Image (cartoon, rainbow, N blue to C red):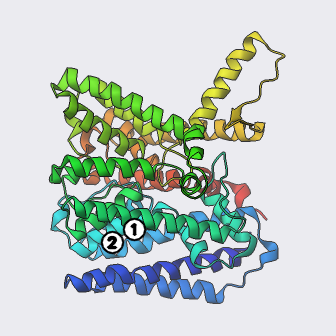
Amino acid sequence: MNFNNVFSILGKVLLILAGVQLIPLLVAVYYQEPLLPFFVSMFAAAVIGFMLNHFSKPNNDEWVIRESYAVIAFSWFFCAIFCAIPFLFEGLSPINAFFESMSGITTTGATILTDIESYSRSLLFWRSFTQWLGGLGIIALFIAVIPKVNMRGRQLYKTEFSGPTEDKISPKISNTAKILWGLYIGLTVILVVLLLVMKMSFYDALVHSFSTMASGGFSPYNSSIIIFSNHKIEIVLTIFMLIAGTNFALIHKALTKNVKSLIRDEEFKAYILFFAIIVGFLSILLIRDMDYGILESFRYASFQIASLMTTTGFSSIDYNLWGDSAKMILLLAMFTGACSGSTAGGPTIVRWLIFVRHARRDIFKVLHPSAVKPIKYNGKSLSEDVVHSVLSFMVLYLFVFIISSVLLSILGLDIVTSVTSSITTLGNVGPSFGMIGPLDNFSVLPPLSRIILIANMWIGRMELYTVLLLFTSEFWKR
């Protein structure tokens, strides 16, 4: 591996991170709050970024795929480190500051802050802004801002957006990144305006729009969306959470070419159908077990399912008080995820589709062992390499989930907290059940368990392989 290639791009990423920190710095100026936390973070990222970029001598001819994986993994990890600096100034321990930062940049939304409203408005703005930066991907932002990265850009983009299918918007990867970021910014602005119409303050509208479009879920309030107690706000956020969980390339295609491409896409149809089915089931359970009315049940069910399925993590009610059958539906939503190419985490719907179709084909081949039955997606046959890659991902995802759950239980957590905190961090969902319900926080967990969950957030946001490859000896061999 040529570390000069890796350090050169990592340096540029840190310089971009330093530049965007001017925004929370201006917010601190506006609210007359301390500037030092953001200045130190910005200065540190700028100095380290400049040194890495200046002293590294990249060689494009020696660029290999493992360097793309290293750039992606290190960029997210070190950005989380520098983003944690402002939290240190608020009195958080290094582990807690890194937990909050990693949760933000990976759009997980799990928090260790015990009294959120006591923190400065500029810090809470920064907290939600980190989610928005991580929503479409740090490297996608890098490619959009610094497009002259040749073939490295396409390799980096494909590595960050690793998935079983690829949606091309433009032959030039830099144009693709710009288009996606333009769409992302445009949708964020529209949501801000709608929330202002719903009588939110500009500050609240902005930070909640950041968290919604990033599928992040951070709120500047301890009670999340519950504090507004406004069904119109919940409807708007539900719609935009579902939009954020949709493939952005598909949204762009529907807006610019043919809207039918959206409703013809198999993943999007499965996404909406599955959402509707489990909302229906949950609504019935809430009517039966919680004595809610029909409209009230549908209101709570649709918001919570949209929030957990898209891995956003907002809550409009304390669902930790619901019965076990309702919680099982919510857990199912956590496991599913949304669409590939969106800002949501989790396994993604397309992988579940391929996984189920592979299982169905195996059952078919028991009766017809000689039959050749390719697995199709959107009318096209998938190569066996793609199918095997999906199966490997699903098995590995389950393996990491089980290992982290076991480790958390060994540290003394009850089984509900161990299992749900593992899946909520690996899937970048945010809130969970047990000790860490939607109105609780992760500060009650032992420090070592927080380190495990930090690793889960990092691994989950990188879709497993990018991080796990770093721990193999073959990755570091020349």
The amino acid type of the residue labelled 2 equals: Trp
Spot occupied by residue 461 in the image (x, y as percentages of width and height): 51, 54
Question: Does residue 355 lie above or below 213 as drawn?
Answer: above
Quarter in which the C terminus is drawn: bottom right
Instruction: Characterize the local packing of mark 1: few (<14), some (14-19) or many (20 or more) Cα atoms within 10 angstroms.
Output: many
The answer to whether one can see residue 352 in this image is yes
The answer to whether one can see residue 314 in this image is no
- Compared across the picture, whether 82 is left or right of 171 comes to left
Spot occupied by residue 125 in the image (x, y as percentages of width and height): 29, 70
Q: Locate residue 316: give its quadrant.
A: top left
Q: Are marks 1 and 2 in contact (CB under 8 Å)?
A: yes
Mark 1 → mark 2, Cα distance in angstroms: 6 Å
* Secondary structure beneath label 2: helix
Residue at image point 28% right, 28% down: 283
Which is nearer the eye, 180 or 77? 180
Q: Locate residue 217: give its quadrant.
A: bottom left
Residue at image point 39% right, 64% down: 188
Which is nearer the eye, 18 or 70? 18
Question: Does residue 287 lie above or below 386 as drawn?
Answer: above
Q: Locate residue 409: give its quadrant.
A: top left
Which is nearer the eye, 277 or 359? 277
Residue position for label 2: 126
The amino acid type of the residue labelled 1 equals: Thr
Instruction: Characterize the local packing of mark 2: few (<14), some (14-19) or many (20 or more) Cα atoms within 10 angstroms.
Output: many
Residue at image point 41% right, 83% down: 42
Residue position for label 1: 130
Question: Does residue 282 lie above or below 54 as drawn?
Answer: above
